[in-house]
Amino acid sequence: MADTPDIYDEVAYAYDGTLEGLLSAIFASYANREVPTDVAPAARLQPRLGQRVAVIETNPEHAARVLSGVRRIGGWQAVLALKRAACSDEPDAGTAALRFVRYAMDEQKKRNCGTCRKKNCKGRGGAGPCPRQRGRAFSDITHPAVERLFQISRAIGQECEHMRQFVRFTHLAGEGQNLWFSRCNPKASVVPLIMGHFVERMSDVPFIIYDEVHEVAGVYDGGDWYLVNTAGNGDLQSALPDATADEALFAEAWRTFYRSVSIDARYNPELRRHFMPKRFWKNLTELQETPGLRKA
């Protein structure tokens, strides 16, 4: 995977949109000894004039090798950045991930143990990579190969924080069931990144977080969580039980609390829209059935 490509072709790599698919495309770039000008999910790829499109099949073994290599030379921050890039809706997220991996690999070759003067280093005697340089590639955010991936990773991190703040659950009825449901509309497919947070917070109850934009649902059954692709199956909520009898009471109590802590004299709609983006409002319990707030 460290070989320098000797063919620069106007080619685009199309993958299935998953993290494993993106890593497989990066592996294919080394295996095919070519640097694609674009790497994107097949559903969003828009080929350029005269550009050849290569469809890359997802290979879990190849993906694991790439992820292991990135973790070894870039540390956990680089791995997290690749995971976030795979969840991004930005058209150049896959391309940014490939460019970073190639840059990190090339930089590591310049810093192998064979050129190091440290006598007491715990390196592998010239085999590299140097343990003292781990994670350094991703910290060089001024480099063009790092800057774009850093920007994408930061944006996805902010979207994950929005989801952790603005996800609201509804208690659903059903015989022998104790299910909680949440509908959200993020700018990126971040449900896989936030499921771990909610599993820790709600480990004793099953729940579903439904991303209506990307048509994917994170389902926790009380023991483990998994993703469900709901594309083509209509609205997921319509197939679920209705809310419990107490749900309306608790929802109104939450709205009452929200109104009671507000200070009319300090009402600032622009500031509120900055910290609470308006695209989330339709799924926030405290803002439903509140015409005054809805007009803000």
Image: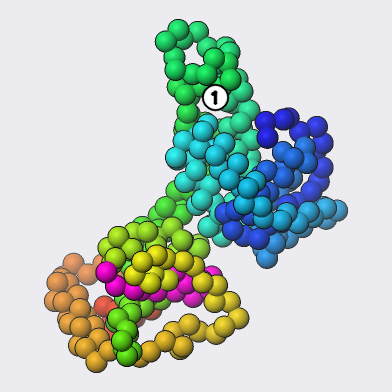
Q: Position of residue 148 (x, y in %)?
A: 55, 44
Residue at the location (51% across, 50% down)? Answer: 83
Residue at the location (20% across, 78% down)? Answer: 254
Task: In this rendered view, identify the residue nearer to me: 228 or 155.
Answer: 228
Q: Would you place residue 255 above or below residue 133 in this image?
A: below
Q: Position of residue 246 (x, y in %)?
A: 21, 88
Question: What element does badge 1 sit on?
Answer: loop
Task: In this rendered view, identify the residue nearer to me: 99 or 79.
Answer: 79
Q: Would you place residue 251 above or below residue 39 in this image?
A: below
Q: From the viewer's perspective, tell me whether residue 36 is left or right of residue 286.
A: right
Q: Quadrant of the N terminus?
A: top right
Residue at the location (47% across, 46% down)? Answer: 80
Q: From the viewer's perspective, tell me whether residue 271 is left or right of residue 193.
A: left
Q: From the viewer's perspective, tell me whether residue 35 is left or right of residue 237.
A: right
Tell me, yes or no, if residue 6 can be seen here.
yes
Please name the residue that numbered disc 1 is placed on. Answer: 129
On whether residue 108 falls in the magenta region, the answer is: no
- First to last magenta residue range: 204-218
Tell me, yes or no, if residue 281 can be seen here.
no
Task: In this rendered view, identify the residue nearer to me: 122 or 268.
Answer: 122
